[in-house]
Image (cartoon, grey):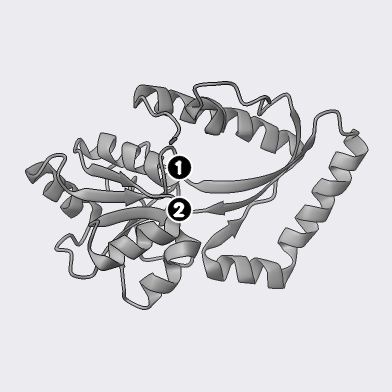
């Protein structure tokens, strides 16, 4: 998404400057509130915002971050408006949620899972195409009747452009083997991350589709990078 946020060119092209190797993991974006929040579902929270449009502080990990974009999709689907409070990362956003300075937050499952399990925050929904195995009882926003709200945060592997195909394939095979290792998969999934290896071709198509999709959303919401 970064290329779409910048007002000046970054000196590289996310498609032509790299050779896709593989998608590595997906991190599900989850909507959470404090346990004392009256909202018991994503619709309850939306109703609170409907009663107080633009007044309920809602944290994110920064302007243009995936949690911020998840918030934009959630607002559009529920037809409500929150007061967006961007932070510089998940740690300060979570600290202020726990302290009551903001009333809701989108962030990755691996970041929030220990606090969900400890009962310090309550998960209302995930902004994803499917539920996360680490929190299987938490529905997707789409399940709740809010379509077009998938906002997985993902990580992939890229090599420099013009890397020989044989090397790309060797790297791909090595990462695929690592992702299939039972201990690695178990550790990732217990943290809330989803191992998601692909072929180089599949990752290249996915990268292009993600850039196109989020570019439209960034432009539609007039989002630019944080100074």
| SS at mark 2 in the image | loop
Cα separation, mark 2 vs mark 1, equals: 9 Å
Say which element carries label 1: loop
Extreme-bottom residue of the structure: 118
Which of the 4 quarters of the picture holds residue 187? bottom right
Q: Which residue is mark 1?
A: 65
Residue 185 location (% of width, % of height): 66, 66
- Residue 182 vs 64, above or below: the answer is below
Q: In the image, which is nearer the foreground, mark 2 or mark 1?
A: 2
Q: At which x and y percent is residue 218?
A: 42, 28
| Position of residue 53 in the picture relative to residue 122 (left or right) | left
Q: Callout 2: 10 Å neighbours few (<14), some, many (20+)?
A: some
Asked if residue 85 can be seen in this view, the reply is: yes
Q: Is residue 9 above or below residue 196?
A: above
| Disc nearer the start of the sequence (2/1) | 1
Q: Report the residue at 56% width, 28% height from top.
A: 3
**Residue visible at 22% across and 49% down?**
57
The residue drawn where x is 30% and y is 61% is 96
Residue identifier under label 2: 89
Q: Residue 95: horizontal and vertical position, in percent?
A: 35, 64
């Amino acid at each position: 998404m970064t290329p779409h946020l910048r007002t000046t060119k970054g000196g590289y092209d996310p498609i032509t400057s790299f050779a896709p190797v593989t998608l590595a993991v997906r991190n599900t974006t989850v909507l959470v509130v404090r346990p004392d929040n009256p909202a018991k579902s994503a619709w309850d929270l939306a109703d609170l915002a409907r009663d107080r449009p633009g007044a309920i502080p809602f944290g994110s990990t920064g302007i243009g971050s995936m949690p911020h974009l998840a918030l934009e999709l959630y607002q559009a689907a529920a037809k409500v408006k929150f007061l967006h409070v961007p932070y510089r990362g998940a740690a300060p956003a979570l600290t202020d949620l726990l302290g009551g300075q903001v009333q809701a937050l989108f962030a990755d499952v691996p970041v929030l899972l220990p606090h969900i399990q400890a009962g310090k925050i309550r998960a209302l929904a995930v902004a994803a195409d499917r539920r996360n195995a680490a929190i299987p009882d938490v529905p997707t926003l789409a399940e709740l009747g809010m379509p077009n709200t998938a906002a997985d945060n993902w990580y992939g592997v890229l090599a420099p452009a013009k890397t020989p195909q044989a090397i790309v394939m060797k790297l791909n095979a090595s990462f695929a083997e690592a992702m299939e290792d039972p201990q690695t998969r178990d550790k990732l999934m217990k943290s809330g991350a989803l191992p998601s290896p692909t072929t180089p071709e599949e990752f290249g198509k996915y990268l292009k589709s993600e850039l196109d999709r989020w570019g439209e959303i960034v432009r539609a919401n007039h989002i630019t990078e944080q100074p």
